[in-house]
């Protein structure tokens, strides 16, 4: 009966309110099904036709296709739209699912999480308050509780889903700054702004740490000058002896150590800082200890490699990126704290949204724990994944990609054409084509050329980075379908491009 009344109202008002058929609602179920089916067909076509990781299109070539598009033109139909999007985007999208994509920290995604994305976008819950999400709030809290347990925290831990590792690291540094000010200087930054001592605050990181820590210091008003970089050892892990020396030096110089950041899986090298040692130093000097485990967080999925992050449970806060090693679509990340009371430092109340009396009534509002307000239900993807694949299933993926990376390291070490810079705790390998040992070549130029040729042809993608001013290639292996034969094929292609460079130079 209600549907009939709604249809009558729509019929009477369709002249005043055109395009009602595009609204997601019960009277447009057929339209919804048809359009979603078209989108699904486009994805299937992408899977069928993506025979290599990238099309090889250049920015200049692709930009030309946008020149004739005027977004103020009259709307077009779905047939034309899907053709347009295929030409502009899908045909040239980088295929992270392809076994020969071994460039950045982009994982193939699991089907249960894709199914969850459909629900997330369609129902469109906002996870900031209970009255906008209901069960979604409790599901997110359950997943945060699970993550805290896997880290090794007690039941007093808490956290929230975030947009990515950079946001989680920002929250870690925010809490470190505000906690120190409140508990050591009796100064409430949330109310009174930065204390006069803020220019002396210091944050300690390894020289292989993620750039988002430096960026966070800038955003938080501490400036890049607050970052103290600790040299890594030969394995590109933070040297804990140098860390303590640096802390003492800063104290002697009248500065104030407020945080130390350990990395569980550096972006370039995939190596893990000595977390237990760093935890002991942080405790000794009463410094906030944050672990950036955006890359290495998935090690707690596998009994075989869990020991590599022993000591992470001593951290005050931890960054996790489910959209890296948990095979989740972007975005899906988390920020976890050892003690839920820490999160009060970022709690703000709004009468229309999360009034204080909600706390008394035990109404769960996730906005109290986040620097975001409106926030999508990304947690549902991980819920689907754990319920369908399970922790052990995900752990099997992790075991496989680590095994492939270790095999790849052996292949590189045994090939005289390559120089391997590191053995990885995880799945990142930094190396370079070393050319003819009897002739002098600029190896940075050769390897830069190789990388550009790989992207130009698109049949395999690797990343690049600089170490001590020299350019290197990098494998980041996150696909369980990538085999050692795929790696050998990529290395053969690299040699071919290297030889091309040598022949013309």
Image: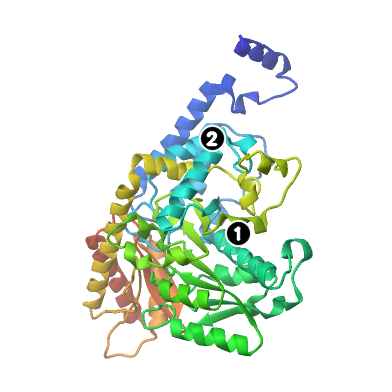
The residue under label 2 is 135
Picture quadrant where residue 351 is located: top right
The residue under label 1 is 342
Residue furthest right in the image: 192
Structural crowding at the residue carrying mark 2, measured as other residues with C-alpha within 10 Å and reported as few (<14), some (14–19) or many (≥20): few
Q: What residue is rendered at 67% in x and 75% in y?
A: 223
Q: Are marks 1 and 2 in contact (CB under 8 Å)?
A: no
Task: Please state the horizontal and vertical placement of residue 324, each as a whole percent of the image.
Answer: 43, 56
The quarter in which the C terminus is drawn is bottom left
Nearer the observer, disc 1 or disc 2? 1
Picture quadrant where residue 376 is located: top right
- Per the image, label 2 sits on a secondary structure element best described as helix
Above or below: residue 201 compared with residue 138 = below
Above or below: residue 13 compared with residue 82 = above
Structural crowding at the residue carrying mark 1, measured as other residues with C-alpha within 10 Å and reported as few (<14), some (14–19) or many (≥20): many
Q: What residue is rendered at 51% in x and 44% in y?
A: 140
The quarter in which the N terminus is drawn is top right
Visible in this render: residue 279?
A: yes
Give the Cα distance between marks 1 and 2.
25 Å
**Which mark, residue 315?**
none
Above or below: residue 191 compared with residue 367 = below
Which sits earlier in the primary sequence, circle 1 or circle 2? Answer: 2
Q: What residue is rendered at 43% in x and 35% in y?
A: 40
158 horizontally vs 301: left or right: right
- Per the image, label 1 sits on a secondary structure element best described as helix
Picture quadrant where residue 211 is located: bottom right
Task: Please state the horizontal and vertical placement of residue 278, each as a whole percent of the image.
Answer: 46, 75
178 horizontally vs 284: left or right: right
Residue furthest top in the image: 1
Visible in this render: residue 45?
A: no
Q: What residue is rendered at 60% in x and 34% in y?
A: 76
Task: Please state the horizontal and vertical placement of residue 246, each as a whole percent of the image.
Answer: 54, 86
């Amino acid at each position: 009966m209600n549907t009939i009344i709604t249809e009558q109202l729509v019929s009477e008002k369709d002249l005043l309110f055109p395009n009602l058929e595009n609204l997601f609602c019960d009277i447009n179920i057929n339209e919804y099904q048809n359009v979603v089916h078209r989108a699904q067909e486009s994805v299937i076509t992408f899977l069928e036709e993506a025979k290599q990781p990238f099309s090889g299109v250049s920015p200049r070539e692709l930009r030309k296709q946008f020149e004739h598009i005027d977004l103020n033109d009259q709307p077009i139909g779905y047939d034309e739209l899907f053709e347009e999007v295929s030409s502009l985007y899908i045909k040239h999208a980088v295929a992270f699912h392809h076994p020969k994509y071994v460039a950045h920290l982009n994982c193939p995604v699991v089907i249960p999480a894709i199914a969850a994305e459909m629900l997330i976008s369609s129902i469109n819950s906002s996870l900031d308050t209970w009255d906008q999400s209901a069960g979604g709030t409790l599901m997110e809290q359950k997943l945060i509780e699970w993550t805290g347990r896997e880290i090794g925290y007690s039941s007093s831990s808490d956290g929230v889903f975030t947009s990515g590792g950079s946001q989680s690291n920002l929250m870690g540094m925010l809490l470190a700054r505000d906690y120190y000010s409140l508990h050591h200087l009796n100064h409430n930054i949330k109310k009174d702004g930065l204390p006069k001592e803020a220019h002396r605050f210091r944050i300690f990181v390894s020289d292989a740490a993620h750039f988002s820590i430096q960026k966070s210091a800038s955003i938080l008003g501490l400036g890049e000058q607050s970052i103290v970089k600790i040299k890594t050892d030969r394995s590109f892990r933070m040297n804990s002896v140098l860390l303590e020396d640096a802390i003492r030096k800063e104290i002697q110089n009248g500065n104030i150590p407020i945080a130390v950041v350990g990395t569980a899986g550096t972006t370039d090298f995939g190596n893990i800082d000595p977390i237990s040692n760093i935890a002991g130093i942080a405790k000794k000097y009463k410094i906030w200890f944050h672990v950036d485990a955006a890359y290495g967080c998935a090690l707690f999925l596998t009994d075989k490699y869990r020991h590599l992050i022993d000591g992470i449970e001593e951290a005050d806060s931890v960054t996790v990126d489910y959209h890296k090693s948990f095979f989740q679509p972007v975005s899906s990340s988390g920020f976890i704290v050892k003690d839920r009371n820490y999160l009060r430092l970022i709690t703000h109340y709004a009468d229309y949204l999360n009034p204080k009396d909600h706390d008394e009534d035990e109404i769960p509002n996730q906005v109290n724990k986040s620097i975001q307000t409106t926030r999508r239900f990304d947690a549902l993807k991980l819920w689907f994944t754990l319920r369908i694949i399970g922790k052990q299933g995900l752990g099997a993926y992790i075991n496989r990609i680590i095994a492939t990376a270790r095999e790849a390291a052996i292949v590189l070490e045994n090939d005289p054409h390559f120089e391997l810079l590191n053995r990885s705790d995880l799945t990142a390998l930094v190396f370079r084509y070393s050319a003819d040992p009897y002739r002098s070549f600029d190896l940075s130029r050769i390897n830069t050329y190789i990388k550009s040729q790989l992207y130009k042809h698109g049949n395999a993608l690797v990343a690049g980075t600089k170490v001590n001013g020299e350019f290197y290639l990098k494998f980041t292996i996150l696909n369980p379908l990538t085999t050692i034969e795929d790696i050998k094929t990529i290395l053969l292609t690299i040699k071919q491009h290297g030889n091309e460079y040598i022949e013309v130079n």
